[in-house]
Image (cartoon, rainbow, N blue to C red):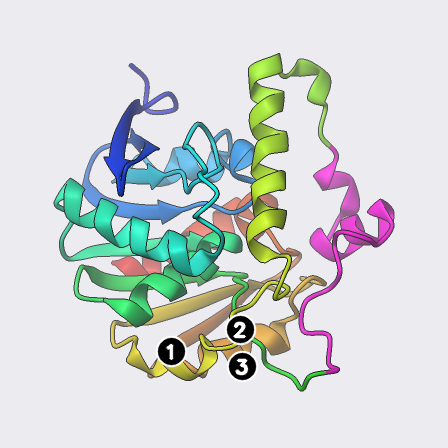
Amino acid sequence: MSIAQGSQQFVVVQGLRMEVERRGAGKPLLVLLSEEAAFELESPFLAELAANHELVIPHPPGFGRSERPDWVSSPDDIAYMMLDLVEHLGLKDIPVLAFSFGGYIAAQMLVKDDGFCSKLVMVDAFGVKIGGPYDRDVQDIWTSHPDKVAAWKWADPAFGKRDLSTKSDEELSIVARNLESFARFCWDPYMHDPKLKIRLHRVKVPALFIWGEKDGIVTTAYGKAYSELVPGAKFAAIANAGHYPQLEQPRATLDAVNSFLG
């Protein structure tokens, strides 16, 4: 089986069947994908990362082929499930690489228990409220015009165009399911947990926040303020990249990740 294909297993956590993929070889790396997981799994970034790491990629409830019961209603719920999954898989002293919505989950996990984690990399993550009650920290991606959303997401909006006609019905179902679950978990409160901000001081592991310089969904100012809530965290910006630098600028993002992880 190729590195790109990897291996797949289903693990039962809290009575819920969760899909876990493994790719590559080397030191294990826990990867929490974004809401664009269906496309990240096919990306050159993950393929290159798997050349030097064994990627452990769990799919949260409602993503991929993982079940989504009604009682799982927030990233806070998902975080407890992920911590149980980490324990079930026997993952210890493992770095965590988390993107966008995956970063929201990672932050929720580590404020509860960071004992399993050696280092944390957050890429254009959601999760906290930086401004005041009437400040828009995160752009409205659900009710805004698709062209405007594309301009926020990508340094080059044309990069975000997908030819979905090449996808199978099963693959299209997963793309739709991922977006539906993303909306379900982040709609209210919108893209953040009001309590997370005051808990981030509990994260004691070395951390790096990577941000696309042209991210219009959550700006670099948001990213820097987010990073300052984690003691000792570093910040790095990726030029000519929007909200998904791992997709738009994979080499620069990979260099930043590898330099930090060592």
Kindly indicate the quadrant of the structure image that contains residue 199.
bottom left
Q: Amino acid under label 2?
A: Val
The magenta-colored residue range is: 134-161
Q: Residue furthest front?
A: 71
> Which residue occupies 33% across, 62% down?
109
Q: Position of residue 212 (x, y in %)?
A: 60, 61
Q: Amino acid under label 1?
A: Leu
Q: CA gap, disc 1 to disc 3?
A: 12 Å
Left of 142 or right of it: where is 12? left
In this rendering, the answer to whether 32 lies above or below 127 is above
Q: Position of residue 58 (x, y in %)?
A: 35, 39
Residue 155 drawn in magenta: yes
Is residue 63 visible in the rendered image? The answer is: yes
Q: Which residue is mark 3?
A: 225
* Mark sitting on residue 200: 1
Q: Which residue is mark 2?
A: 128
Q: Amino acid under label 3?
A: Ala
Left of 16 or right of it: where is 40? right
Q: Position of residue 100 (x, y in %)?
A: 53, 55
Kindly indicate the quadrant of the structure image that contains residue 155.
bottom right
> Which residue occupies 57% across, 20% down?
171
In this rendering, the answer to whether 47 lies above or below 138 is above
Left of 232 or right of it: where is 195? right
- Earlier along the polypeptide chain: callout 1 or callout 2? 2
Location of the N terminus (image quadrant): top left
